[in-house]
Image: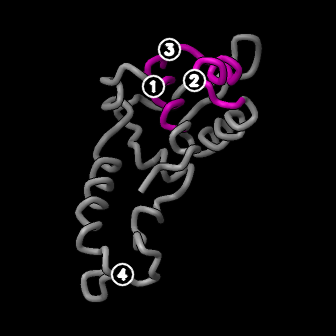
């Protein structure tokens, strides 16, 4: 399983803004600093704002900042806004029904990995990501 490019960008942006929670950062500055295409990023920022994860301010000193303290924003919330959480519950082989009673050939190998990923995104916040040196 892999995060989508949009989710990677969203987590990168949110982590960056969490480190600068006292200032508003423009899309242009974010695009340049994080090397994310401007138009793509502008749409993503709107999406994150509409979900209540970011606040936007208009005007000369406007821009975006995180809407809540980093300890209150969980990784799963970012993933859910961008790509939804369905990928974290579906069969790795693509079967519509795959569970302990009706497992696919990969179920017993994949299930522990999937549970680990779910645990990570549900238990960790943006504050936990601040230990890394890159955003």
Would residue 29 appear left or right of 11 to someone viewing this image?
right
For mark 3, what is the residue?
A: 22
Q: CA distance from mark 3 to mark 2?
A: 19 Å
Q: Position of residue 94 (x, y in %)?
A: 47, 75
| Residue 30, image quadrant | top right
* Residue at 48 percent of width and 37 percent of height: 11
Residue 19 magenta: yes
Judging by the rendered image, the residue that carries numbered circle 2 is 34
- Separation of marks 3 and 1 at Cα, in angstroms: 17 Å
**Comparing marks 3 and 1, which lies closer to the viewer?**
1
Determine which of the numbered discs, if any, sits on residue 135 in the image: 1
Q: Which residue does the numbered mark 4 point to in the structure image? A: 98
Specify which label sits upstream in the sequence, 2 or 1: 2
Marks 1 and 3: in contact by CB < 8 Å?
no
Residue range in magenta is: 10-37
User: How much space separates mark 2 and mark 4, taking CA atoms?
Assistant: 39 Å
């Amino acid at each position: 399983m892999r995060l989508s490019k949009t989710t990677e960008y969203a987590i990168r942006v949110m982590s960056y803004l969490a480190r600068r929670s006292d200032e508003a950062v423009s899309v242009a500055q974010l695009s340049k600093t994080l090397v994310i295409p401007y138009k793509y990023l502008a749409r993503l920022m709107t999406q994150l704002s509409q979900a209540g994860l970011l606040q936007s301010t208009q005007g000369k000193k406007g821009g975006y900042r995180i809407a809540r303290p980093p300890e209150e924003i969980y990784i799963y919330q970012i993933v859910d806004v961008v790509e939804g959480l369905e990928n974290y519950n579906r069969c790795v082989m693509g079967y519509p029904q795959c569970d302990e009673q009706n497992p696919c050939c990969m179920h017993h190998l994949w299930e522990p990995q999937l549970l680990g990923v779910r645990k990570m995104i549900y238990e960790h916040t943006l504050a936990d990501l601040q230990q890394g040196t890159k955003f």
